Image (cartoon, coloured by chain):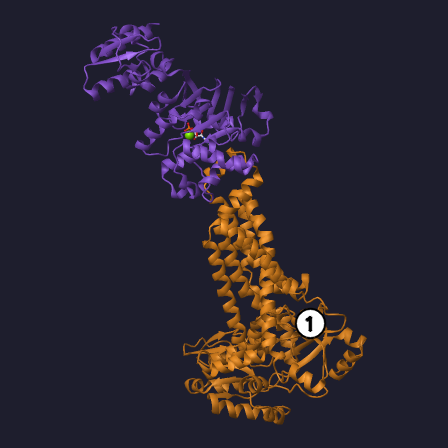
Chain colours: A purple, B orange
Amino acid sequence: MIELKNVSKKYGETIAVNQVSFEVKEKENLVLLGTSGCGKTTTLKMINRLINPDEGEIILNGQNIINQNTEILRKGIGYVMQNIGLFPHYTVEENIAIVPKLLKWDKKKIQDRVYELTEKLHLPTNSLKLFPNELSGGQQQRVGLARALVSDPAVLLMDEPFGALDNVTRTSIRKEFKDLEELKRKTMVMVTHDVEEAFELADRICLMDKGNIMQIGTPKELLFNPANDFAKTFLDGQRLALEFKIVTIEDIWEMLPNAMHTTKSLSANVSVWDAMEKLRSTQATELQFSNKTQQYKSASFDELIKAFNQYKNFTKHE
Amino acid sequence: MNEQQTLWQFMSMESDKLLSQTVQHIGLTFISLLFAIAIGLPLGILIARRRKLSGIILGVAGVLQTVPSIALLGFMIPILGIGAKPAIVALLIYALLPIIRNTYTGIIGIDKHIIEAAKAMGMSKSQILFKVEIPLAMPVLLAGIRTATVINVGVATLASYIAAGGLGEFIFGGISLNNTNMILAGAIPAALLAILLDGLLALTQKLDFKKLKKVLIFSSVFLIFLTAFYVLPSAYGSGLKAGFTPEFMGRQDGDLGLKSAYGLKIKTVVISDAVMYKAAFSKELDVISGYSTDGRLKAFGLKILKDDKGIFPPYYAAPIVNQASLSKFPELEDVLNLLAGRITDSVMTDLNYRTDYLHQTPEKVARDFLVKVGLYKSPKGGAGETIKIGSKIFGEQYILAEIYSMLIKGNTNYQVETKTGLGGTKICFDALVNNQIDFYPEYTGTGLLAILKPDNKIVSQISHNKDETYRYVSDEFSKKYKIKWLKPIGFNNSYALMMRQKQSSEIDVNTITDLKNYLDKN
Ligand SMILES: Nc1ncnc2c1ncn2[C@@H]1O[C@H](COP(=O)(O)OP(=O)(O)O)[C@@H](O)[C@H]1O
Ligand SMILES: [Mg+2]
């Protein structure tokens, strides 16, 4: 769906983006991860031509974006930015309706869509007539997202979409965001410097440093098969927590003891981390799980850890 | 209270003039403002786009703004003549800087993320400009328009210097005629106008964008309507055109006398002394009210029309001194009297010609003159008390002030401070009465008609005889104001009507009566 081929961008002497190539498949969420200044934003903005590359080409839906009218191109791509960038002189409703108005939708259709989105994004309906500065940071971010989603573009670009929020709001919005039906059918490129966020939301992660791609792969690949020292050390700080969060019961299914059918079983989709949380919070000694094929397993805390370690050794030597 | 009533009386008596001047004033302010917006707004947008140009454009607009208003009006005359056109252009130039600068700062002050968001949503350049940049820059932009409006209301008073009308006609007429009510009749409406417009614009700055949009649409229609009021005074027709100073317009020995004694009917505009001669020279005007000793008469090839009915009494020029100053500076009177009778009409005209036309400095002209007549002494460099000399704001007075300054420095130990350019008669005279200056050169006729203002009977009795006039004013001044008229300097400076020599011989008009007959025939 989106393909970058040897894309580079220089600012004077600084090479902001160096020979970057990747592909984002339809409905995939690719996260660009890296420390500040590594070229994530530059890469992202080249996709909707807010920045034009010095070298290389970008193909969207099989078409080189260079050959497309920029304004039409941009109207077809949702864009969410860290600073939100709502129009302060427009009400919330008008802010959300900008793109449909540019696309000359009729009034009724615009209104219906705006209401639909406010509901889906849990924005209070009375906020529609307010101005952005009358909303909380979290609400503003939702408006920013609504504005990007309103015309239901197939592609969504997001630059640190939760960057402006405090930690608590950030975590809760991220959860909602993950469950949002609208987003599941989008092809997304998202930028973040937050490793946890990347791992939580990404189908694949593109790890960058000084304008170069250091590794591109699924969260699991990054964790268990780092391509180089940079990739390895980049995750080291949070490695254990990430591993627990990324490995699911399904992954360690074979290593868990069998169990009888119970009514209170958890889905095997949950992460090892979540399972351990559950054990801790319910003070239970054991948990039951069921998978898609209606098999059942049970595990205590120690059994979980043991299975997890076996899995790790296995994947590393794979 | 009494003062207020007479002001009110003046205003109601002159209500026609007041109304037309106010309308002209508003018209001038808004036409120029409209043009300034039409030019300044795009320029501001341009330099917000091309930041490199901002230095040059803001610099030029800034320099233009520092050009003194009178000078700017003066520069306009050779290019645009007199009347509304140059006044509008001058006002426009003054209004330009705040509008360009505020458009520019308004636009570059917008959060760049908002512009980026607009771009990312696929807005075109013009959509971004009209839907995002201008609306967001609007409060700052309006502040610029507000500044420009207030500046324009103020500067528009000067439009009367170049025959473009406005409330300046009363203000400057009042200053020259020492008529406080006339000054106030112009100044109060001008001030009210400034306050009113400033207040209205301040209100619009507080509105949110939605309401503002409606107000803006409404007010631009209103603006165009207002400017339409200011019908350009282009319909002068083919006859001769006269330009008279505000002072001349209001004086019995001026326009009033021309009307009553000669029955002269001529299309007349009000114009400042500073540009009048040049306007006559460049055929903008045909008849002007000059001074008989003015150097520009010679410089611009003008000819005095004979005052065959004698309505312009000759005026002696003499220093008038505060009596308190005479006792404070005992040597002063004798020194000033050194000049008594030394400058004749033709000498004065020549001295004026040197400054006005040859552009010699008043110091040089004064020194050369004193050397020639053998009165020059190099300064003693004394450390005595300081004498303050005043002068009105025209060339002849500058020269006289310099001559007196050199005489005092050369003959006494007093120090001298010259306060030149004290506007018209009123400003100079008030300064003298209030001991801000010790003396200044004045003319007997001005003392009679502009300061003492006795009733018409006395005026007609004495004003035809220069010695009687001198006696009358010196008696009255010493009684009323404790001011002494010293001995006359010699020359007479009186009003005169003038035309270009060439035109005068072409149409064979040599006297004011000739002029009246010519006008009646054509
Ligand atoms: N407009 C610009 N002018 C000059 N240098 C820039 C500009 N934009 C980005 N850079 C530089 O390019 C590099 C990559 O920037 P960016 O893509 O914004 O990084 P990230 O989004 O990963 O923090 C940085 O070194 C930054 O300083
Ligand atoms: Mg960035």
Q: Helix, strand or loop at disc 1?
A: helix
Q: Is residue B334 above or below residue A291?
A: below
Q: Position of residue A77 (x, y in %)?
A: 51, 28
Which image quarter has ligand 1? top left
Residue that protrudes farthest toward the front in the picture: A263
Q: Position of residue A236 (x, y in %)?
A: 30, 18
Label 1, ligand 1: CB separation under 8 Å = no
Viewer-closest of B13 and B28: B13
Viewer-closest of B282 and A180: A180
Asked where in the image residue B17 lies, by quadrant, the reply is bottom right
The reply to whether residue B404 is in sight is no
Q: Quadrant of the C terminus of chain B?
A: bottom right
Mark 1 highlights which residue?
B299
Q: Position of residue B169 (x, y in %)?
A: 59, 73
Q: Name the residue type under label 1.
A: Ala
Viewer-closest of A263 and B376: A263
Viewer-closest of B86 and A187: A187
How many residues crowd around disc 1 within 10 Å: few (fewer than 14), some, or many (20 or more)?
some
Q: Residue at x 53, y 65 (%)?
A: B154
The reply to whether residue A303 is in sight is yes
Q: Is residue A221 left or right of residue A100?
A: left
